[in-house]
Image (cartoon, grey):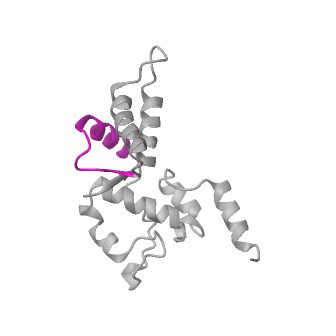
Amino acid sequence: MAGIHVTDIERAINWWRERSPSADGVTACAEVRALAEVYALMVYFRHAECDEDTMPAAAKSAWLAWYATTPDAPCIAICSTSQGDDVCKGCGRTFDEVQHWPVYTPGEKRAVWRRITLEASAWRFNRYAERARVADGADHPSADALERAADAARRPR
């Protein structure tokens, strides 16, 4: 059972708001309403994740529509797990994550994406960030954010 992080719910809500704006400026589309109900409960109960398997059908359908627009795999075609590394230097996934990626659920994939994005230690976030942005562009820090992080890393501690 995988958890869908609240930030992914927010992204899906915003995607739907752009895709299907309110006709009257007040009423949200059905997809936004379904996701907003899940989001509100998460905020109220202070849950960072909702269960992918028990998410209401309308909300899950709306979330999956957004998910289909995101890059599937974080791979940048520099796989060091094939060379024996436990964690890929290119994308940041573990050997097991790389091997089992095709059978992961969307929630499991997004959890891995979230972890590697927060860690930002893989080459896709530094040395090969431009290559990664060309590949999919969606789940990466902006060029400005990458530059700020690089500047901060260069500063003596």
Rendered view: 25 above or below 96: above
Dividing the picture into quadrants, the one containing residue 120 is bottom right
- Which residue appears at 50% of the width and 61% of the height? 117
- Name of the residue lying farthest toward the bottom: 84
Considering the image in quadrants, where does the N terminus appear?
Answer: bottom left
Q: Which residues are magenta?
A: 49-68
Whether residue 73 is visible, yes or no, is no
**On the picture, is 101 further left or further right than 19?**
left
Q: Nearer the viewer, residue 42 or 18?
A: 42
Q: Is residue 56 above or below residue 32?
A: below
Image quadrant occupied by the C terminus: bottom right
Residue 132 sits above or below residue 26 on the image: below
Q: Is residue 22 above or below residue 126?
A: above
The image shows residue 26 at horizontal and vertical percentages of: 46, 18
Residue at x 23% of width, y 50% of height: 53
53 within the magenta span:
yes
Residue sitting at 40 percent across and 84 percent down? Answer: 83
Q: Residue at x 70, y 61 (%)?
A: 148
Percent of width and height locating residue 100: 27, 69
Rendered location of residue 52, percent (x, y): 27, 50
**Residue 126 drawn at (x, y percent):** 59, 67
Task: Using the rendered view, name the quadrant where residue 104 is placed.
Answer: bottom left
* Residue 57 colored in magenta in the image: yes
View extreme (right): residue: 156
Q: Nearer the viewer, residue 5 or 123?
A: 5
Report if residue 58 is visible in the image: yes
